[in-house]
């Protein structure tokens, strides 16, 4: 059996997927930390051990993400745009739009009927609209990122977050708290602001059904709901939205091997 590996080294997290050509064999997630190459290597070795494999048993390894060139065992490095599109197309063959929101950036990818990237737009220069902005909000209001979705699940009211700059929005959120605005309303306002910024970044006309939402922020049900409301369309989320890039890299590794 031929086995393949995809490694996605992002600014906040690292994902590794072992793939047998048809399905995921093992997958794992770790914090990037201050030494991404070491963190990626440790996660890679841990998954190999879990699957009772050795690195030389892998037919090909493809890395992606901002730190893709740090992973020396990789046989090839590809952009995260290509990897996310390939991973989403495998999971949802009818997908035409990918919205990916990670810790430090957000991106919208357009795809054709073959799952090939036709265009994309990316925000990697401003924290607003990213997971970091949501993390900062959680620190201010005293709610962990992991519990946010449950915290707002029964709450529909939201307040307007007018500033689209993370620094000024932080001051605005503090002011709302001091004014006695309920925390769930503030969180819903932040989720709506993230959704609004993501959609406006690309232009609504570039968003075509079927839409798939990936990245760590896609695990937050409040943001998923806000995106659906902002777009007025269904937005699907993979069972493990954070590993899509690594899965795409593994799929590319398999395709490279078969093309030899």
Image (cartoon, rainbow, N blue to C red):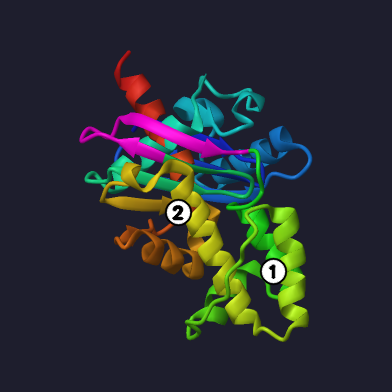
**Residue 62 horizontal/vertical position (percent):** 49, 27
In the displayed structure, does residue 114 sit left or right of residue 199? left
Residue at point 30%, 21% (across, down): 258
Q: Residue 9, can we see it?
A: yes
Task: Give the vertical position of 6 relative to 242 (above or below).
Answer: above
Instruction: Say which quarter of the image contains residue 162.
Output: bottom right
Q: Nearer the viewer, residue 171 or 76?
A: 171
Q: Nearer the viewer, residue 108 or 193?
A: 193
In the displayed structure, does residue 244 sit left or right of residue 135? left
Q: Are marks 1 and 2 in contact (CB under 8 Å)?
A: no
Residue at point 65%, 80% (across, down): 183
- Which residue position is annotated with label 2? 241
In the displayed structure, does residue 152 sit left or right of residue 252? right
* Element type at mark 2: helix
**Residue 230 horizontal/vertical position (percent):** 40, 62
Task: Give the vertical position of 137 relative to 118 (above or below).
Answer: below
Give the numbered dot on residue 79.
Answer: none
Residue at point 49%, 81% (across, down): 153
Give the numbered dot on residue 138.
Answer: 1
Overall secondary structure of the magenta stretch? strand
Q: In the rendered structure, which segment of residues is drawn in magenta? A: 109-124
């Amino acid at each position: 059996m031929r086995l393949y590996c995809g490694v996605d080294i992002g600014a906040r997290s690292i994902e590794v997927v072992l793939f047998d050509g048809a399905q995921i064999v093992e997958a794992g997630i770790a914090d990037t930390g201050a030494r991404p190459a070491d963190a990626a290597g440790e996660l890679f070795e841990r998954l190999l051990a879990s699957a009772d494999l050795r690195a030389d048993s892998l037919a090909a390894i493809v890395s992606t993400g901002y730190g893709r060139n740090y992973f020396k065992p990789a046989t090839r490095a590809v952009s995260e745009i290509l990897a996310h599109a390939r991973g989403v197309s495998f999971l949802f063959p009818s997908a035409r739009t990918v919205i990916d929101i990670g810790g430090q950036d957000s991106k919208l990818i357009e795809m054709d009927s073959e799952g090939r990237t036709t265009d994309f737009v990316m925000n990697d220069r401003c924290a607003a609209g990213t997971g970091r902005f949501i993390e900062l909000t959680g620190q201010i209001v005293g709610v962990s990122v992991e519990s946010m979705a449950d915290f707002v699940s029964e709450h529909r009211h939201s307040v307007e977050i007018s500033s689209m700059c993370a620094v000024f929005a932080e001051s605005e959120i503090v002011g709302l708290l001091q004014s006695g605005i309920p925390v769930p309303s503030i969180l819903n306002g932040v989720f709506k602001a993230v959704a609004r910024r993501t959609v406006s970044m690309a232009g609504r006309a570039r968003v075509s059904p079927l839409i798939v939402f990936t990245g760590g922020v896609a695990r937050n049900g409040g943001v998923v709901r806000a995106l659906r409301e902002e777009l007025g369309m269904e937005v699907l989320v993979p069972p493990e939205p954070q590993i899509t890039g690594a899965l795409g890299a593994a799929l590319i590794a398999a395709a490279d091997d078969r093309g030899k």
